[in-house]
Image (cartoon, grey):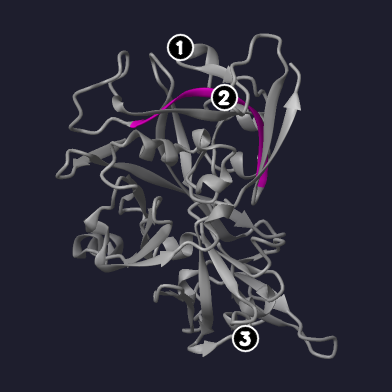
Amino acid sequence: MVAFYLLSCLLGMSRSIADEQGRKKLSVKLHKQLVPVRNADHKIVAHKSAYFGTIFVGGPVPQEFSVVFDTGSGHVVLPSSECSSPTCLIHRRYSRQESSSSRDIDYNGQLIKEGDARDAITIAFGTGEVSGEFVEDKICLPQPDDEDSILEGSPKVASNDCVDMRVVAATEMTQEPFQSFSFDGVLGLGLDGLALAPEFSFFSRMVKQGQLGAPEFAVFLAEHEDDESEITFGGYNPAHLQGDITWTPVAMPELGHWQVEVLGVRIGNVKVPWCNSTDKCRAVVDTGTSLLAAPKDFQPEFQELLGTEIPKGQNTCKGQILTKNLLEFDLAGGFTVSLAVEDLAHAPLDIQANSSESSRTMCVPAIMPLGLPEPLGPNLFILGEPVLRKYYTLYNWERKEIGFGRVPPMSPQLESTLLV
């Protein structure tokens, strides 16, 4: 979820693997949820999806939350017990009063006394926003299976897998996307430029703590629900990788986004004219976005080139034979991201080239139009879950690079299960 923020003043489960130096890799399992998207006739035409995992906050009895590990934002955001809106009430809410390790703070970490004016923040995501206040507390990953040092009062959390950091306790949350999905909050994994300060960045704090095997994390989003998705901190899981990793430098890292330069785009092996040496393009690799997004100036034509004409009156793409065109992004660093049209969610759309022609019904891929001003836009793509389900991605914090690797083919056992 590509995020922006506004600061204001108001009154009032996992596995652990040790490397040769004894430092660790921590893997957290991710769960997938699908939410249907309906048309005007209330028929399901597509699905939105989210992958989320478990964290624990505070103590002595840690509070459990499910969060999206989001490379497109920079803060940890949790519903607050002070939020009483319908959106907050359907989720678990963070209670500062129940955590002896919590502190009310301003954004700069200064302790707030009772009755003092408080800083507050509004964070706008791609499909919603939250407003909240600041607290400082410890964020913990689930207990590794082989961990002996457990926090008092909890059999689930390892004491040395916690970081002290600043958190946004949300007092307001919009209905979308937070009411549609069952996850409670967001754990931002964007670079420091997306956070108010490094003390708000979960992974920055983990790297500074110095216990990880490497200053990087890796994301594996399984194509099928019968396979396990996971995020690994401190390295990567070789089981999710086939062949080598190709590293691509992060473009404009000071902006905070994990974005790469796009050297060219091809559809069906034909280069499109939009991304070239004059009109340069970039792409944000975003684990919090369920779709592919394209610059709004050429998104309609981009979508139509990837579409397939279907019989007029059809109101579903299910069962239609789609074009076999490949969509390819050539990235700086020498890696090419390739997507078959079948890898994208599709929906029927009536298209009319001009007033003299009759409309055609096209089965078009769900590509979100994106209109952002400079310096991030305007020629910006978002490589969301369709790309992340096809490639294993690694994010190196110190070198400011993204690694891309191919995932192994489906195991015979899983393929047999899916066929049954």
Kindly give the residue lying farthest to the top in the view shown: 114
Work out which quarter of the rendered image holds the C terminus and state it. Answer: bottom left
Q: Nearer the viewer, mark 2 or mark 3?
A: 2
**Residue indicated by mark 2:** 109
For the residue pair 19 and 228, the one nearer the viewer reads as: 19
On the picture, is 271 further left or further right than 162?
A: right
Q: Nearer the viewer, mark 1 or mark 2?
A: 2
Q: Which residue is mark 1?
A: 100
Q: Which three-letter amino acid code belongs to the residue tagged 3?
A: Pro
- Frontmost residue, 328 versus 318: 328
**SS type, badge 2:** loop
What is the CA distance from the residue labelled 2 to the residue labelled 3? 49 Å
Residue at mark 1 to residue at mark 2: CA–CA distance: 17 Å
Residue 402 relative to residue 10: left or right = left
CA gap between label 3 and label 1 equals 58 Å
x, y percent for residue 317: 56, 72
Instruction: Using a 10 Å C-alpha cutoff, classify the residue at mark 3 as few (fewer than 14 neighbours), some (14 to 19) or many (20 or more).
Output: few
Q: Residue at 58% across / 54% down in the picture?
A: 255
Please give the label number shown on residue 127.
Answer: none
Disc on res. 273:
3
Magenta stretch: helix, strand or loop mostly: strand
**Place of residue 189 in the rendered image (x, y in percent of width and height, measured from the top left):** 47, 45
Q: Identify the mark nearer the N-term, 2 or 3.
A: 2
Packing grade of label 1 (10 A; few <14, some 14-19, many >=20) is few
Q: What is the quadrant of residue 242 in the picture?
A: bottom left
Mark 2 is on which residue type? Gly
- Answer whether residue 16 is visible to the viewer in this image: yes
Amino acid on which the number 1 mark rests in the picture:
Ser
